[in-house]
């Protein structure tokens, strides 16, 4: 029974991570910069986070307050478990654009990964204010929080 529950929780976690990862690299028209984001998204799909970080820093030199670039930098650093730099870039992205849905979602995920459930829930509340339950970012963070809580209960 315990093994079945552990396997079920592990599969649920993998599903949530896959959904979040696919969302993070989905081709979208929401990026506001003039550069071609597709090569960076391909790096992220291939989990070449260090290469993506280099390219994002290069692009950031030309557009230092681009919230999309900053959010993806935070995402890339978080995927390398460099939580300190990830936090720096998420906060920078949110300073540039406080209602950036991706940066708010990713920041919530960082809080979950670093054991700060209350802060993750605060990010969810903020997302509910800027996009309600109608946006993917809210739904993805909510699923991640729910999964985190389920795993903590078992």
Image (spheres, rainbow, N blue to C red):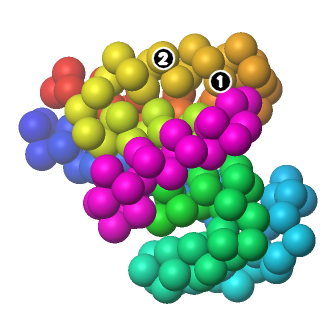
Q: Are marks 2 and 1 in contact (CB under 8 Å)?
A: no
Q: Quadrant of the N terminus?
A: top left
Who's the residue at 38% across and 56% down the image?
Answer: 85
**Circle 1: element type:** helix
- Residue placed under numbered mark 1 in the picture: 127
Whether residue 86 appears in magenta in the rendering, the answer is: yes
Q: CA distance from mark 2 to mark 1?
A: 9 Å
Q: Residues within 10 Å of mark 1 (few under 14, many from 20)?
A: many
- Residue placed under numbered mark 2 in the picture: 122
Tell me which secondary structure the magenta stretch mostly adopts.
Answer: helix
Which residue in the rendered view is the most extreme toward the left? 2
Whether residue 102 appears in magenta in the rendering, the answer is: no
Q: Is residue 38 left or right of residue 55?
A: right
Q: Is residue 98 left or right of residue 48?
A: right
Compared with 23, 108 (above or below) is above
Range of residues picked out in magenta: 77-100
Front-most of residues 47 and 139: 47
Who's the residue at 52% across and 40% down the image?
Answer: 91
- Report x, y in % for residue 153: 20, 21
- Report x, y in % for residue 154: 16, 27
- Report x, y in % for residue 35: 83, 76
Q: Is residue 91 left or right of residue 130?
A: left
- Report x, y in % for residue 77: 41, 63
């Amino acid at each position: 029974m315990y093994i079945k529950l552990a396997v079920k929780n592990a599969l649920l976690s993998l599903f949530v991570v896959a959904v979040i990862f696919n969302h993070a690299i989905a081709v979208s028209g929401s990026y506001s910069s003039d550069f071609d984001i597709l090569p960076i998204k391909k790096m992220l799909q291939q989990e070449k986070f260090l290469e993506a970080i280099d390219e994002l820093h290069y692009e950031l030199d030309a557009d230092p307050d681009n919230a999309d670039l900053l959010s993806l930098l935070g995402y890339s650093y978080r995927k390398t478990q460099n939580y300190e730099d990830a936090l720096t870039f998420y906060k920078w992205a949110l300073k540039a654009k406080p209602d950036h849905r991706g940066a708010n979602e990713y920041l919530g995920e960082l809080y979950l990964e670093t054991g700060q459930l209350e802060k993750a829930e605060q990010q969810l509340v903020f997302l509910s204010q800027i996009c309600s339950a109608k946006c993917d970012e809210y739904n993805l963070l909510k699923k991640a929080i729910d999964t985190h809580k389920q795993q903590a209960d078992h």
